[in-house]
Amino acid sequence: MKLNRKRLIIVVLLVAAVLSIAALALVIIKDRTYFHSPSYSPDKSIETDILVVYYSRSGNTEAMAREIARKMKADIIKIESESYGLDFKGWFDAANDARRKNETEIIPEVVDLTPYRLIFLGSPVWLFRPAPPLWTFVDKNDFKNKNVILFNTFNSRFKDEEIEEFQKRVENKGGRFVDHVYIRRGRVYNQKSGMELILEAQSLLEAKVPEWLEIDK
């Protein structure tokens, strides 16, 4: 009887180990996959006072950024950071910097925001707060008299106090924080597809754009 019980425990432990390894492998594969959303280029023949600035490590925030820019007929700028590649080191550095609230090197650092009335700032959420490149961008730029909308994609959740801290950072740089919108993709084992994310972004925009277009007009 004791032998059978011991064998059962070993089998349960082996199954648990196999499931854990499989889950880890799935996370790694997902983390190294970049979602390539439909591209967007602003129509240079149309003057705009709206700008979308975003950082995206795996393409999901980029998909949302492009949908916002497309709907708002906005200019768009992607923030690049070499610190967070699609490998284990990139993942580790991202988690570590988010935990320590570190900033990071980005390109571009400074953008002339003078022509813009409304600025969208986007990033994924890492450890309950916007990703480090977005904080760096805010600290490097002048948002005086600019209306700012934060947008995020994430797997789990954000914390209100982290969003409030980001709002204060924008306000300390002269900006007016007017809204925060987001899409929760879900955990890796039950995650929205790229197309589902895009459709949700489009639905969100249908509801919010009329409100945004009236800001300070």
Image (cartoon, rainbow, N blue to C red):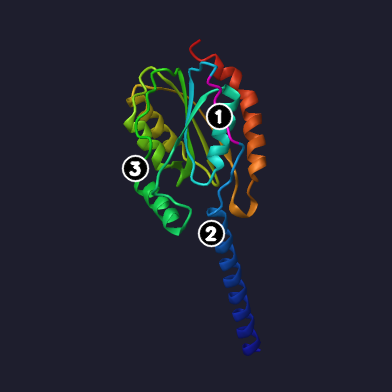
Q: Does 12 appear above or below 168?
A: below
Q: Position of residue 102 (x, y in %)?
A: 33, 45
Q: Residue furthest front?
A: 45
Q: Which residue is mark 2?
A: 28
Q: Position of residue 43 (x, y in %)?
A: 56, 22
Q: Which residue is mark 1?
A: 41
Q: Of circles 2 and 3, which is in front? A: 3
Residue 30 falls inside the magenta stretch: no
Q: Are marks 2 and 3 in contact (CB under 8 Å)?
A: no
Rendered image quadrant of residue 7: bottom right
Which residues are the magenta region? 39-44
Q: Which mark is residue 74?
A: none
Secondary structure character of the magenta stretch overall: loop
The amino acid type, in three-letter code, at marker 3 is: Glu
The amino acid type, in three-letter code, at marker 1 is: Ser
Count residues near mark 3 (Cα–Cα under 10 Å), then give few for <14, some for 14-19, many for 20+: some
Q: Earlier in the sequence, mark 1 or mark 3?
A: 1
Q: Earlier in the sequence, mark 2 or mark 3?
A: 2
Q: CA distance from mark 2 to mark 1?
A: 31 Å
Residue 41 falls inside the magenta stretch: yes
Count residues near mark 1 (Cα–Cα under 10 Å), then give few for <14, some for 14-19, many for 20+: few
Q: Which mark is residue 105?
A: 3
